[in-house]
Structure formats: C-alpha cells, structure tokens
Amino acid sequence: AGEALAAAFKGHGTLQGACVGHNDFGEGVCSRLALAFCQNPRLDTLDLSALPLRPEDQRMIDDSSMLAKEPPHLKAAVQLVVKNQPTYKCVDLMFRPGFHERQVEELGMKFLMIALRDNDHVTSLALGGNKLNVPTCRYIQRELRTKPNITELSIVYNQPCLDFRDARDFCGMLQQSPHIRSVDFSRNLMLEEGAQELLNTV
C-alpha cells in the first residue's frame, strides 16, 4: 500500500494534502513517500504522524513545503521535470532581469535536482545568472554524476562568480561523468588557475 501511495503522490495533478500517519509503514516506504512529496510541487502538506521517519526525510519534507515561495519560473520548471515528457529536453533557468521575479538559490536548486532523479528525458541544464553557492554547486555535481541522460551544463555569470576552486570541483565531476559533453562556464572569474584545471581535464 505504501509503494502505491508513493507512486500516486508523485504523479497526482490536483492533490494538495495527504495524511497517512498511524499506518504500518517501514522506514523505506516513508522515505519514498517523502521523496514523492518533494517531487510533486502541487502537494502542500504531508502528515506521517507516528511513522518511523528518518531525520533527513523529515528535513526534506520541511524544505519541500517552501517550494511555494520559490520563483514562478523555478516552480514551472520543476512541474515540467516531474511530468517526464519526452519533448521537454532543456531546463532553462537562466535568470533574465525584468522577466524573472528573482534568482534561484540553494533551496530552489535542490528541488530541481530532486525532481530530475526520476527524469529520463532532460539532456541540458541552463542555470546561469543565479545565486549558486559552493554547497549548491557541489550538490549539483553529485547529482549529475548519476544522470547519464544529461549531456550539457551551462552556469554562466553565476553570483558570486565561479572561481578556480569551483573549476576544480566541476573538473572532478567531469572526470567521473563522461556523459557530459558540453559545459559553459563563461562570464565567471575562474582565472588562469581555473583554465588550467579545465585544460588538465580535457
């Protein structure tokens, strides 16, 4: 029953809240319920009272309730990723002043990467112009290592600008991610040290 609920939560288009506490679910099922909740941006509340919920899953649920406060273009992108449609190939979150309400930051990018875990069709990520700090960039790197369908990554003009240490981190990801064939880190501050890191990876 728990597995069926997780599948229903993930794909339901109109459900906004669910209470499934005091059922005989194990930790594994609770984790899948929590993940499904995070992958459906329409779900606002999930009650798992008296269930064996791990602290990291509770944090994921707590964070997910914040999705409603994220920029509209991020929410729209997450919804399209969750649908997993073959025609949706490029997630374009490039920040455009005057067109987008505000930039995507750490929590919003986490929502996107969680949604991408079960998406098999997206091949390109355009994430430039946003506020991606070091932990966020490293989170992106970890997730992309497990996504062979994603072959293109663009983070131009990040704020703060990517530096040579970020270049080193991304080069480490590229060495473990042969599926990534194209990267664009232009308009940052990687300097000569960053360029050398990239050259050593090619």
Image: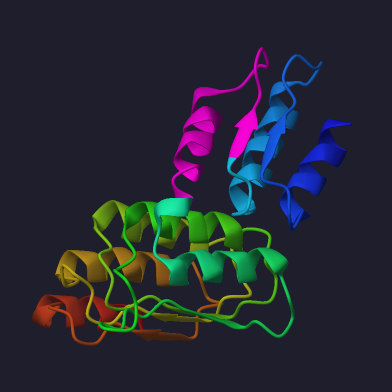
Point 59% across, 58% down: residue = 115
Q: Report the side of 53 relative to 127 (left or right).
A: right
Q: Residue 173, position in %: x, y?
A: 41, 66
**What's the magenta region?**
45-67
On the question of residue 175 being in view, the answer is: no
Q: Nearer the viewer, residue 175 or 155?
A: 155
Q: Report the side of 14 relative to 128 (left or right).
A: right
Q: Residue 194, position in %: x, y?
A: 18, 76
User: Quadrant of residue 129 in the image?
Assistant: bottom left
Above or below for 134 versus 89? above
Q: Residue 128, position in %: x, y?
A: 32, 78
User: Quadrant of residue 13 in the image?
Assistant: bottom right
Q: Is residue 29 magenta?
A: no
Above or below for 108 versus 163? above
- The N terminus lies in quadrant: top right
Point 23% across, 66% down: residue = 166
- The C terminus lies in quadrant: bottom left
Point 80% across, 47% down: residue = 7
User: Quadrant of residue 24 in the image?
Assistant: top right
Q: Report the side of 182 relative to 53 (left or right).
A: left
The colour scheme is: rainbow
On the question of residue 140 being in view, the answer is: yes
Point 82% across, 38% down: residue = 5
Q: Is residue 64 magenta?
A: yes
Q: Report the side of 67 relative to 4 (left or right).
A: left
Q: Residue 148, position in %: x, y?
A: 61, 71
Callout count: 0
